Amino acid sequence: MPLALDLYSCAGGAARGYHNAGFNIHGVDIIDRSARYPYRFEQGDALDILDRLIQTGEIEQYTLIHASPPCQSKCALTVGTNTSRGWGREHVDLVAPTRELLEKSGRPYVIEQPDGQADVRKDVTLCGEMFGLGVLRHRNFELGGWTAAQPKHLKHRGRVRGWRHGKYHDGPYVAAYGKGGGKATVPEMQQAMGIDWTDNHEELTEAIPPAYAEWLGRAFLTQHNAT
């Protein structure tokens, strides 16, 4: 099976999708996720580990690299790579240095970011409605060394459930972030995103639905196997 490197892996939402598409997985995160991450896991700084793999030539074993780096507009970067490098609460953009190393690696890659945040090319944008999920969770994906056609962005079936400006709105989607105000419970987030191996609230709020990465992985392998 082809091997995918999952950088800034969190609890493995992307990893499960790539695995479903036909990849073996090697996950990397600064926080120890080994108790819940469902595949091979290595704790450490993603940039340092990626650089090491490039320097030793071990990077050649990976067919695809996926990276979900913290981005500049997230103001609460108090853990993870920022802390390890002494960056504290500064607004540090890890997308640029990650992209630089990914380009240096010479391997095909995916950079994932929430909509409206870091400066990534929007080669593909995915939404939960495309997969019949109970979350919208729009995500942008920059593709390096390969391409994929943008799927049709389906019309949303209604609103995200919860309170907005003092008024409660019902809808077919749950808010899989934060707490209170009608936000989703842990079981609701698990069901809405298709994640059943972790019940950690923070990990669920950060995860991408596995269906996204499965779509990307299958699109990549279709193109890769055709060449």
Image: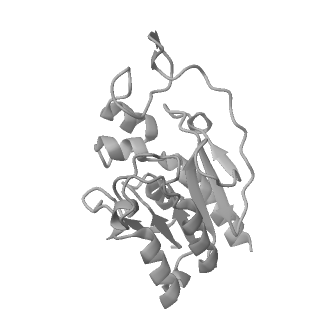
Q: Quadrant of residue 64?
A: bottom right
From the viewer's side, name the closer residue of 75 and 17: 75
- Side (left or right) of 141 relative to 187: right
- Identified at 39% across, 52% down, the residue is 89
- Identified at 62% across, 37% down, the residue is 130
- Identified at 43% across, 42% down, the residue is 194
- Looking at the image, what colour scheme do you see? one colour
Looking at the picture, does residue 132 appear above or below residue 164? below
The residue at the far top in this view is: 167
From the viewer's side, name the closer residue of 157 and 30: 30
Q: How many marks?
A: 0
- Give x and y (percent) for residue 14: 48, 55
From the viewer's side, name the closer residue of 39 and 98: 98
Looking at the picture, does residue 66 appear above or below residue 184? below
- Give x and y (percent) for residue 210: 48, 49
Looking at the picture, does residue 54 appear above or below residue 102? below
The residue at the far bottom in this view is: 56
- Identified at 28% across, 56% down, the residue is 36
Q: Quadrant of residue 103?
A: bottom right
- Side (left or right) of 194 relative to 131: left
- Give x and y (percent) for residue 195: 39, 44
- Give x and y (percent) for residue 44: 35, 70
- Dividing the image into 4 quarters, which one contains the C terminus? bottom right
